[in-house]
Image (cartoon, grey):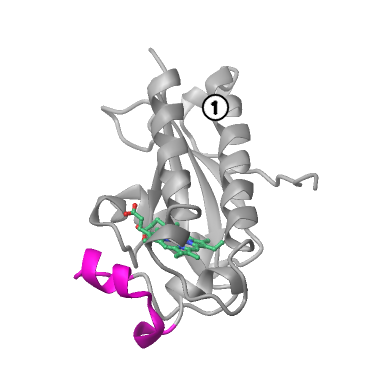
Amino acid sequence: MKHFLFILLIFSASKIWSAPLPESLFKAIAEIENVNSMRESLAITIPENEKANLETFKSVCKPVGMRLQSLNKENQWSIRQASDKFRNPQHKAQGIEIKAINMFKKDKSLVSFISDSQEKDKIGFYYFRRINVQTSCLKCHGMKNKRPDFVIQKYPNDKAFGFSVGDLRGIYSFFVEVKK
Ligand code: HEC
């Protein structure tokens, strides 16, 4: 299925918008789409009546994390998953990611946007892309007491449950520096 990508540029007074956007930004955006489609197509392979377990996790959100890691290594990128309701504490949303999450929550039709860093000592662009909850995600991110046993054991401070279809699960976040 061809994925339609909607990018909204958030313009600001920053001068960096006058130069062309870095090529790596577009490469990373395309890879984020691939990774997101991969998760969605993997999640629907868990049969309806099968309880999710460590094995099924190995075929859904684990390969997503691993793919991002290898993309980052290959390209010296820093694509992250971030959430205010995170399961893995490494995915806790920070700073500008919290602002992006609030924007996605306010505007459900907003799929992704590019923003400048808005910090003096960090010149470059951020890209944010929403991650929505689908029916297939609820086996592991649905009701608290329906979570698979491995999740309860492995993530004692889990916050990534209680979602409904269409909720914002989190974001992909990417920063590319622009040299002065
Ligand atoms: C088989 C269980 C399972 C299914 C199904 C599942 N997830 Fe996850 N998900 C997990 C686990 C476990 C983690 C923590 C991974 C880690 O340690 O990095 C996670 C982490 C995530 C994260 C990273 C942020 C965080 O909370 O750590 C996102 C985003 C996410 N899942 C989205 C989804 C979406 C969207 C779907 C449905 C398309 C989905 N998941 C389906 C088990 C699952």
Q: Position of residue 56 (x, y in %)?
A: 47, 61
Placement of 19 over or under 33, stated as above or below = above
The quarter of the rendered structure image containing the C terminus is: top left
In this rendering, does residue 49 appear at all?
Answer: yes
| Ligand 1 has an atom within 8 Å of the beta carbon of the residue at disc 1 | no
Q: Position of residue 173 (x, y in %)?
A: 44, 43
Rendered residue at 59%/25% (across/down): 27
Left or right placement of residue 28 versus residue 5 in this view: left
Q: Name the outermost residue toward the top.
A: 180
Q: Position of residue 13 (x, y in %)?
A: 48, 35
- Ligand 1 shows up in which quadrant of the image? bottom left
Span colored in magenta: 143-159
Task: Compare residues 94 and 70 and report the one nearer the observer.
Answer: 70
Placement of 50 over or under 102, stated as above or below = below
Placement of 114 over or under 147, stated as above or below = above
In this rendering, does residue 10 appear at all?
Answer: no
Q: Position of residue 42 (x, y in %)?
A: 59, 54
The amino acid sitting under disc 1 is Leu
Examine the structure image and report whether residue 154 is included in the region drawn in magenta.
yes
Judging by the rendered image, the residue that carries numbered circle 1 is: 25
Rendered residue at 58%/80% (across/down): 49
User: Which quarter of the picture shows residue 146?
Assistant: bottom left
Task: Compare residues 63 and 116 and report the one nearer the observer.
Answer: 63
Left or right placement of residue 137 versus residue 151 in this view: right
Examine the structure image and report whether residue 24 is included in the region drawn in magenta.
no
Rendered residue at 31%/75% (across/down): 149
Helix or strand or loop: what does disc 1 sit on? helix
Q: How many marks?
A: 1
Placement of 152 over or under 44, stated as above or below = below
Label 1: few (<14), some or many (≥20) within 10 Å?
A: some
Rendered residue at 59%/69% (across/down): 136
